[in-house]
């Protein structure tokens, strides 16, 4: 059996938000290699999104890009409608788009607060609403953060937004069963934030029981597992080297 195509045999099209860069890009390319058609969402990273699309097409699947601003509620609703018009075989939604803004509560202005909540929680909420109204059977994977398991005051509104999505993952799994499964993946230190120095990374890794950063491949394996495991819903896999059990 050709395992490289096994996943795509029963799930035809995947919509991945924030698929132009970082984990979103890696998931898009990986799943195209597995035989899925890929709907690539982006907001400002058009060049990168086009590069991902071209790679996916070279992998022998259909792929298109969709530009929508997920900081606006209507952006999420319009995105899911546009993707479904083009890909009627849509069966998987991966909510990967995210903003990661460092800000204590006292430093958080309205714009920072709204960006964190709208992109990290409200958009996945409305994408889930749209997806479940259009798709009769499928799977949703929410990309979370190991910070949902503890409190980090330096990322006040970011942490709250991810905790909301974490709880919504369980709530929506219950609401949309048995036909739609909803799960989460909570990465730890996989891809460091842009611009961090070696000292910062050393401090991060000291908080990880396994004392190293994870690899993108660890996330991709978790994605495959959740797609294939049809008796799992409402669960979150912590891919963080044990950081969630140690805390901040």
Image (tube, rainbow, N blue to C red):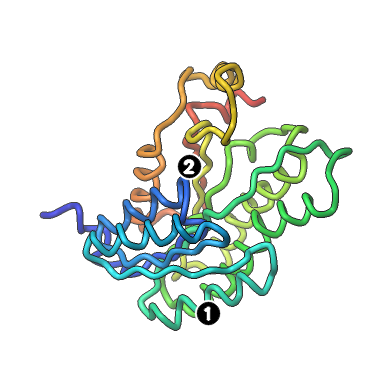
Vertically, is 219 above or below 41? above
CA gap between label 2 and label 1 equals 29 Å
Tell me what residue is drawn at x 50 percent, y 67 percent: 177
Q: Which residue position is annotated with label 1?
A: 81
Residue 4, position as x, y percentages in the image: 20, 53
What residue occupies the far bottom of the structure in this picture?
A: 85
The residue carrying pointer 2 sits among few (fewer than 14), some (14 to 19) or many (20 or more) residues within 10 Å by Cα, namely: some
Tell me what residue is drawn at x 60 percent, y 51 percent: 98
Residue 138, position as x, y percentages in the image: 41, 68
Q: For residue 28, what is the image quadrant?
A: bottom left
Mark 1, secondary structure of its residue: helix
Residue 95, position as x, y percentages in the image: 53, 58
Q: Of callouts 2 and 1, which one flags the residue occurring earlier in the amino acid sequence?
A: 1
Residue 36 visible somewhere in the drawing: yes
Which of these two is toward me, 126 or 179?
A: 126
Residue 181 visible somewhere in the drawing: no
Tell me what residue is drawn at x 81 percent, y 36 percent: 104
Which quarter shows the N terminus? bottom left
Q: For residue 79, what is the image quadrant?
A: bottom right
Mark 2, secondary structure of its residue: strand
Vertically, is 134 above or below 61? below
Which of these two is toward me, 43 or 104?
A: 43
Nearer to us of marks 2 and 1 is 1
Q: Is residue 244 left or right of residue 59?
A: right
Q: Is residue 34 left or right of residue 244?
A: left
How many callouts does the rendering have?
Answer: 2
The residue carrying pointer 1 sits among few (fewer than 14), some (14 to 19) or many (20 or more) residues within 10 Å by Cα, namely: some
Vertically, is 130 above or below 115? below
Residue 124 numbered mark, or none: none
Q: Which residue position is annotated with label 2?
A: 237
Residue 168, position as x, y percentages in the image: 63, 57
């Amino acid at each position: 059996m050709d395992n490289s195509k096994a996943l795509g045999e029963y799930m035809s099209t995947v919509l991945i938000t924030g698929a132009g860069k970082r984990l979103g890009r890696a998931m898009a390319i990986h799943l195209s290699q597995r035989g899925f058609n890929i709907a690539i969402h982006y907001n400002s990273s058009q060049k990168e999104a086009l590069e991902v699309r071209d790679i996916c097409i070279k992998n022998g699947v259909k792929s298109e890009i969709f530009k929508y601003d997920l900081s606006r509620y209507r952006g999420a609703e319009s995105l899911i409608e546009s993707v479904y018009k083009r890909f009627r075989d849509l069966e998987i939604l991966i909510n990967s788009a995210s903003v990661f803004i460092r800000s204590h509560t006292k430093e958080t202005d309205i714009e920072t607060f709204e960006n964190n909540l709208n992109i990290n929680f409200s958009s996945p909420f409305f994408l889930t609403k749209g997806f479940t109204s259009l798709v009769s059977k499928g799977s949703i994977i929410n990309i979370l953060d190991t910070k949902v398991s503890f409190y980090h005051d330096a990322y006040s509104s970011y942490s709250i937004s991810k905790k909301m999505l974490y709880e919504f993952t369980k709530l929506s799994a219950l609401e949309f069963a048995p036909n739609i499964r909803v799960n989460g993946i909570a990465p730890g230190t996989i891809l460091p934030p842009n611009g961090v120095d070696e000292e910062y990374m050393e401090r991060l890794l000291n908080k990880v029981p396994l004392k190293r950063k994870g690899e993108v491949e660890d996330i991709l394996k978790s994605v495959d597992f959740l797609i294939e495991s049809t008796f799992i819903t409402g669960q979150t896999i912590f891919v963080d080297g044990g950081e969630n059990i140690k805390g901040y």
